[in-house]
Amino acid sequence: MRKAEPKNNIKRKMPTQHAIDRRSFHFKALWDTRRELIAHEDQGKIIDIYLLTAIGTLGITSGFVCWIDKEAHNNHVTSRGLEPGDIKTIEENIPKIIQLYFPESLPQNRPPPMEARLMTYEDLADPSLFPHQTRILIQWSINNQYLGLTGFGEKILAKTYDDEDLELLRSLTYNLMFAMHHALSTTIIRQLRLNLQQKNKDIEDALKQTERNKSDLDRRLFHLKSFYDIFHELSGLKDTNRIMETFLLLIMGTFSVGQSYIMLLDQEEKTARMTCRGIENEKHGKLSQDQIDNLIRHCLEYAKVNNLAPMNARRLTDRNFWDNTFRPLEIKIELLFVINESCLGLIGLGNKITLQSFSEEELELLMTLVYNFMVFLENTRSFETIQRLNVDLEKRNIELNKTIENLTASKHKVEVLERAKVRVKSAIQKEMEKTRRMSVKDFLLILSVSLLLGLVFNFSNPGGITLIPQNWFRKTPAQIDVHWAKLKHDAGTALFVDARPVEFFRQSHIKGAVNLPLALFDFVYMMNFGDLDTQREIIVYGRNISSRYDEEVLFKLVFRGHENVKVLPGGLTAWKENGYPLES
Amino acid sequence: MKVIRFIIKGLTHRYLAFIFRLYIAGIFIYASMYKINYTAEFAETIASYQIVPYWGVNILAVVLPWTELICGILLVAGIRVRSATAILCSLLFIFTLGIFINLLRDSPINCGCFHTIGETISWRTVVRDIIWLIMSIHIFFYDKAFHLEQKFSFTLKEI
């Protein structure tokens, strides 16, 4: 690429009048163009003026300006004197033109900002990119973003461009660049101004919003403070009436109301508690039981019809609500709240002191406070119920303690009785077992009693017998040996007396012996021995292990006066053993 | 088997024992009446058996009737039946043994069970006493009915 150097050509040649006029014409054209370009801000218009000025001033047949916005990829082609096909060729070749004349990789091939490079047709690297009539190409740039390429065709009068033409084109191009730069700056400034205006508007809107927010926050703060005050005041109260009074005062202060009331209705207790402020006592008075019952029934029906669940409240807007029932006062706002199925109430507020109407926010705050009030009211009622239950529980505890004491005493008694029962049972068992068995104790008892009774009876009976054998206390009777007795028997000098019972005598006795049984002694003696000589020797025999018949008979004979009486100790047994005569 | 079982059940029945109890009790009470009133004669009877030493005859004659009476009364009342029955069994055994011994000795003595002048001892007497002994043994093992002390115990138990 070769740059034209018109200044050197101007210096070498002496200027002629024609040249001076021409130059003057060029300067004038430049001046007018400059003034006109400065006056416009539209880039298309500027390019149009530039093209028209260049073509008109130099008498060029055609020209085009290719305006490139690299960042926005917004390219425009403005032309004069070109066929549509040429314009299309340029538009289609714009990417190649950018790559060839404004390469990113070779910054030296691009003109520096606010600089212009002129190239003749011969210097073009690829002339096919442009229309064939293109003779001059000017490469220029505003900055790295805005680039431009201007092409001019042949001159009408001359075939080539002289130096002054090139100088004019260069100057026009500089003016174009300045104008475009100015237009871009103006556009940017205008855009900035618009942006600034928009920002200001946004700021104003933001300030207004801030004001609204502040107002809203103040209101919220006031609501919160009211909520906090009510919460703080009510939280320490445990009495339903005090809670109602405190809440009434607080909402009157919060909403600046002169008259208000709260009525709490209890269906189970059939009571109505009422608290009011700013109302004369005569106006509300004391409700009769019928009025209370009607009011409770009416409110319950209303809550049922309007599906008012427990722990909910509703503003009464029905004008007919108080028909045929007692109404405390003429109120502005009235709420029906339901604590549970059997407890509900009414809150009424009169006109404000300022006579203003209630706003929606105030109504919302009122509802919130009423909900809060309901919670406290329910808690307090629960607390009162708990207190009542505690009192009952305490009483029951006392009764229970007494019962436990009684039970303990009863348990002690039962234990004593159980022990007694065990002992009695054991004794009974023992007695029953005794009946089933014999014991030495029984034997001893029976024998002892028998002995005792026998002895007592024998002692007291005139026909009693001696228990100790009498012969133990008598002298030993005279005895005779069995052999001597045999001698005397043979000699017939002694009378043999058999003292045994008659049955034994009959069975067997010493030959010649006479039976004198002890049991029949007196009778037999009188019958058989009455005339017997008392000096006659008598030998008595008859004894066994159980009885000493002989000794008893001997003593009786002695008692009768017989002096020579002897006992045969061996008795009939010794007699038999010696083989002495017997008879039966 | 059923008949045998029925017979065994009948022979060991409590009411049969109760009848035996009343019978034995009546016999001994009746026998004791004479013996208590005629102590000397009863002593002669004891002596006639020639079993008891002469120094023990009188004391036995005094005590034995009262023992029979008390045991008879206890049997009737149903008090300490087993102990009383055991004593009566012992007495009957001794009586039977005494009669048996004297029969072997051929002693011409009276039984003396109820009267001084009564029947002379014989094998019939032995059989009779053995029957009474069996009755007493039956009472000892099977008697359970109408015990006065059991009635008293049951009353306490109910209480």
Image (tube, rainbow, N blue to C red):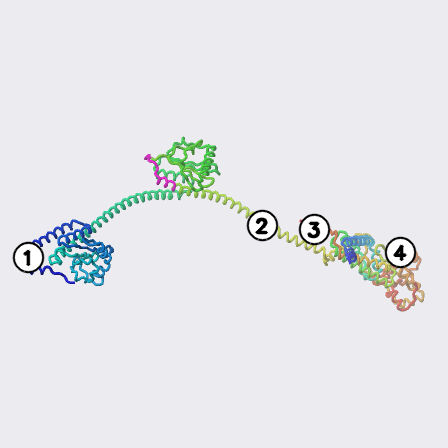
Q: Tell me the mark number nearer the camera, choosing from 1 and 2.
A: 1
Point out the stretch of residues depicted in magenta: A353-368
Same chain for mark 4 and mark 3? The answer is no
The answer for which chain carries disc 1 is A
Q: Tell me the mark number nearer the camera, choosing from 3 and 1.
A: 1
Residue of label 4: A522
User: Which residue occupies the foreground of this view, A567 or A136?
Assistant: A136
Residue at point 47% right, 32% down? A290
Regarding residue B63, the answer to whether it shows in the image is no
Residue of label 2: A411
Q: Measure the alpha-carbon separation of dots 3 and 1.
A: 173 Å
Quarter containing the N terminus of chain A: bottom left
Q: Measure the alpha-carbon separation of dots 4 and 1.
A: 230 Å
Q: What residue type is labelled 1?
A: Pro
Q: Measure the alpha-carbon separation of dots 2 and 3.
A: 27 Å
Residue of label 3: B154
Residue A542 belongs to magenta span: no
Q: Tell me the mark number nearer the camera, choosing from 4 and 1.
A: 1
- Residue A484 placement, left or right of A172: right
Q: Measure the alpha-carbon separation of dots 4 and 3.
A: 60 Å
Q: Tell me the mark number nearer the camera, choosing from 2 and 4.
A: 2
Q: Which amino acid does label 3 sit on?
A: Phe
Query: Does label 4 or label 1 sit earlier along the sequence?
Result: 1
User: Which residue occupies the foreground of this view, A374 or B7?
Assistant: A374
Residue of label 1: A15
Quarter containing the C terminus of chain A: bottom right
- Residue B60 placement, left or right of A298: right
